[in-house]
Image (cartoon, rainbow, N blue to C red):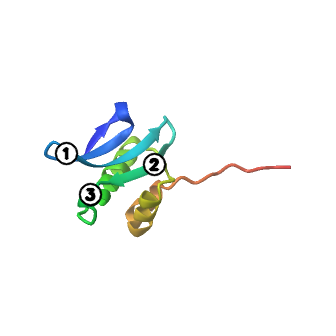
Amino acid sequence: MTDVPEHGRFEAWEGDRLVGFAEYIRSGSLVVYPHTEVEPAFEGRGVGGSLARAALEDARARGLPVLATCPFIAVWMVRHPEYADLAYQNRSRVVD
């Protein structure tokens, strides 16, 4: 997995072929993962999971909470509770 900040995504390559990516929007206080895509020929081969793991490990290393709006990343986090501590928690309180 390769972080390609100029494209705002992690990429998975097999040889010279891009086989998947996980897009991100990163700020100094949060990282959002809006979309993950794997080439159909590579589905079921662990590419998506590897992308999710690389993205979440990067967030952990940066000390950033994760807002996973991508359904794949969101479900992957639920299935891998060792990343639950990264889930963004909205702590805002609305007072009337």
Q: Disc 3 marks which amino acid?
A: Val
Q: CA distance from mark 1 to mark 3?
A: 13 Å
Foreground residue among 27 and 21: 21
Q: CA distance from mark 2 to mark 1?
A: 23 Å
Secondary structure at badge 3 equals helix
Look at discs 2 and 1 and give the one toward the viewer.
1
Q: Disc 2 marks which amino acid?
A: Tyr
Q: Is residue 28 above or below residue 94?
A: above
Secondary structure at badge 1 equals strand
Residue 22 at x, y = what percent? Answer: 37, 48
Disc 2 packing (10 Å; few <14; some 14–19; many ≥20): many
Q: Disc 1 marks which amino acid?
A: Arg
From the viewer's perspective, tell me whether residue 93 is left or right of residue 34: right
Secondary structure at badge 2 equals strand
Residue 96 at x, y = what percent? Answer: 86, 49
Q: Which residue is mark 3?
A: 47
- The tag earlier along the polypeptide, 1 or 3, is 1
Look at discs 1 and 3 and give the one toward the viewer.
1
- The tag earlier along the polypeptide, 2 or 1, is 1
Q: Which residue is mark 1?
A: 17
Q: Which residue is mark 2?
A: 33
